[in-house]
Image: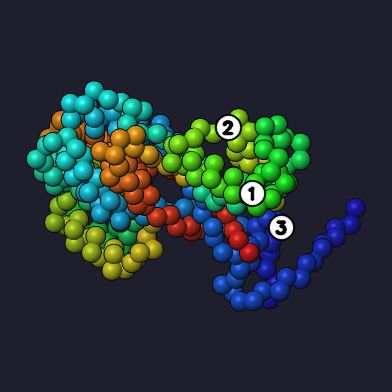
Amino acid sequence: MSKKSKKTKVVIQSMTDLITNSSTIIYTISDNSPKALIPLVDEFFKIAGMKLKCKDVFDISVQKDMDAFWDYCKDQVDESNEDIPKELRCRDWNKAAKAWYKFQKDLESGKIQKPKWFKELEKEVNDQLGDSSGDTTLVIVPKDPKYKKLATLLINFLYSTDAQESYDG
Amino acid sequence: MQVKIHSATGLITNSSTVIFTYSDSCVDAIKPLVNEILKLSGDEHKCDDIFSLVITLEDSSEYFTWLSREKTNHDGVPQAVLDASSVGREYFRSLLSDIKTGKADKPDWFLRMEEDLANNYWDYDMDWRPATVLHVNAKNPKYDDLARLVVEFLYSTEHDGGRQG
């Protein structure tokens, strides 16, 4: 059997109009969530007749996805920078990914506070990647273990929606 | 210039992204949250005692699409609604408003309509399952602000689409 090829002519308006075989990724951006969480928790304490405010029971922050730091570190950070823990700047990607995941969990659970080197790294990554660097996640760290379950349930609720992407046009 | 295309579905030209948000799972997430809030404040009520929770389609025009196109699954739908008369459309809008605010339960035909739209949206020329939204209604005005703030918190995130590969 002879090989035949079929040619299709596609009119492309510009190079940026052509995307081939890409997979879709949806980013969730939580930067506005602290502004919504604080009055909610304050209202809860008001209803409960408690003289507490959100800031009395929770440390709240928004955390950029650790993948952004991992990507940045594996390509751009000076391997000899001893301020950053060795396991986070190693060139073995699997080891580094696990180390970044553990670092993220420790930050989110309040086990560790943001180290100085990480705050500097955040600034570097933000300056370089801007808003296009993926997910941001709300982090709620209870100041009293009594509110640990509430913090978990607030996070579960915030991220209980599902999102799917389609194309229009 | 020649570009190799792996498959027809691998080619997307000049599309804009639309993101659909589904809130169906939020009911299961809000109940333990509100129960914990009430427990911490020493209140013996449960979420169902203070809030009515309703999920509806985000875009009500999708209900009208079903009502105008569905021809075989009509049991129980008021004739005026099917006729798309102004009275019928007003009746439906009023019913939907009452459902969203917890003043009315969804009739059986309404539940069937939502199930059909979720499972067979392509029959109604929709490219994607219609987005859904959570409504939280306080049964006691004391909890009105809490209901509003819970919803504002839930929808405080934004979604952005990107492509990988």
Residue ranking furthest to the top: B44
Q: Earlier in the sequence, mark 3 or mark 1?
A: 3
Instruction: State which chain disc 3 sits on.
Output: B
- Rendered location of residue A35, percent (x, y): 25, 54
Q: Is residue B136 visible?
A: yes
Cα distance, mark 3 to mark 1? 47 Å
The residue shown at (61%, 76%) is A14
Amino acid type indicated by mark 1 = Val
Instruction: State which chain disc 2 sits on.
Output: B
Name the residue beneath numbered marker 1. B87
Q: Secondary structure at mark 3?
A: helix
Amino acid type indicated by mark 2 = Pro
Nearest-to-viewer mark from 3 and 2: 2
Q: Earlier in the sequence, mark 3 or mark 2?
A: 3
Amino acid type indicated by mark 3 = Ala
Name the residue beneath numbered marker 2. B107
Q: Is residue B115 visible?
A: no
Q: Secondary structure at mark 2?
A: loop
**A125 relative to B125 in the view: left or right:** left
Nearest-to-viewer mark from 2 and 1: 1
Badges 2 and 1: C-beta atoms under 8 Å apart? no
The residue shown at (27%, 35%) is A152
**Does label 2 lie on the same chain as label 3?**
yes
Name the residue beneath numbered marker 3. B8
Cα distance, mark 2 to mark 1? 19 Å
Instruction: State which chain disc 1 sits on.
Output: B
The residue shown at (63%, 33%) is B109
Res B47 → quadrant = top left
- Rendered location of residue A132, percent (x, y): 39, 63
